[in-house]
Image: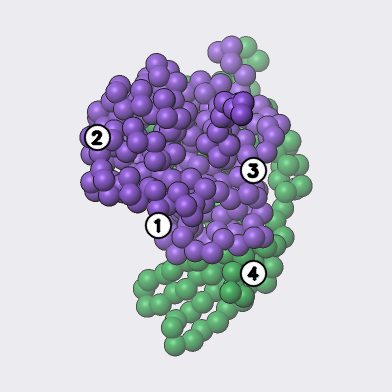
Chain colours: A purple, B green
Amino acid sequence: MGRTSLLFDDFMTIPAFSCTDAHVIPAPAGDTSLRRFALEAKALGFDSIVAEYTGAFPEDCAIPVARITCIVGETQQKAIRDAGKAARTADLVGIYAGDAGILRGVVQSGSVNIIYGLASQPTGTLDHITARYTAERGVAVAIELNSLLGRHSHRRQRAIRAYHDILRLHRKHHFPLVLGSGTNSYLGLRSPRAVALLCRSFGMEDAEIKAAFSAVDTLLHPHVPVEVI
Amino acid sequence: MAKVRPPTLRDNRRYVLARYEPRYREFDPKKMYYVVQDAVTGLFGDLRSVSIGQAVMSCEGGFLIVRCLRGGEDDLGAALAAVTAVGDESVAIHPMKSSGTIKTLRDVIKNNQPVMGPILEETNSEGQTLIRREGKKVDVVRRKNMSQNNFYCVPEDMEE
């Protein structure tokens, strides 16, 4: 009690690239085309999306789309090499969290922008040391709702526990958080309002939710100190 | 006839309007009721579910009206967003608005009716293909034997 209902809050007053779905996977990896994803996301209230897409980018999407290439950390050297190659063609580079040591090394190298898939990994994949490197390098950690929506019972509880750990580390080390649906179908998208309600249900604060919606903009346009030549 | 309770003893109810996708799917309201109940209980447990007091009032034309007790709108909205399927059919539910009366929500429904185009149906050696259009949205449903493949796109993707 004492908090206004989010159903009455207007999340749509926020300006551009500041309400972003941080992870969608369009066709051919999914059943929805990139243009359709952009159209549906716009209809739901997003002003941009981040798409894991390898094909030629159409120029007539309904909203701005940032391309992300996600790497899998088989070994640290390979992951860093793949991240370097990906950075030449994509706007952002992501990594699917796996081995904790490899993740720490890749994050420390500064080669990636977003870490995905922590809710599916064992506890401790993102530890306090990796969290510190994540904050120092400005790497964002993604909270993906497909881990919450597609699961039930103990698997969903495990995902929520992972979110709690991420939030605890975020509040201590202040690395950026981003919110993504992690879906390969437009039916997996949820409106910003619904995403906010779900995030609030597992303990995110309203200010954290708003910051997470707009964090992708900071990743695309990082603040650099002014250089006097 | 049931006796009307005095105002002090009446529950304070709210009605939540949600939109579901795909809009053209028809769902049995009873099935939807159990799906919503499972979603609320799964996310918040039995105790909170009683204090939310959810009940599906209507489910048609792409819109869902769910009753709840005052104070439970946000948690009900979260639970609706957590629904991913009704039976074997994938669905997405997007909470839109909450109101004290159903009349207000029915007015919102009237102002948000989708414009559905004609359904094109083709049958060839690959099976049956249904193409549904709503404005710029094209849903291609391919049925072959007992399996079904869906592809959601826009007209420009079809041209490519």
- Which comes before the other along the chain, label 1 or label 4? 1
Q: CA distance from mark 2 to mark 4?
A: 44 Å
Q: Are marks 3 and 4 in contact (CB under 8 Å)?
A: no
Q: Chain of mark 1?
A: B
- Which comes before the other along the chain, label 2 or label 3? 3
Residue at 57%, 78% in the rendered image: B121
- Judging by the rendered image, the residue that carries numbered circle 4 is B155
Residue at 48%, 79% in the rendered image: B128
The x and y percentages for residue A43 are: 65, 48
Q: Are marks 1 and 2 on the same chain?
A: no
Counting other residues with Cα less than 10 Å from the Cα at mark 2, is it few (<14), some (14-19), or many (20 or more)? some
The x and y percentages for residue A143 are: 43, 35
Nearer to us of marks 3 and 4 is 3
Q: Which mark is residue A100?
A: 2
Counting other residues with Cα less than 10 Å from the Cα at mark 1, is it few (<14), some (14-19), or many (20 or more)? few
- Judging by the rendered image, the residue that carries numbered circle 3 is A47
Residue at 55%, 48% in the rendered image: A66
Nearer to us of marks 1 and 2 is 2
Nearer to us of marks 1 and 3 is 3
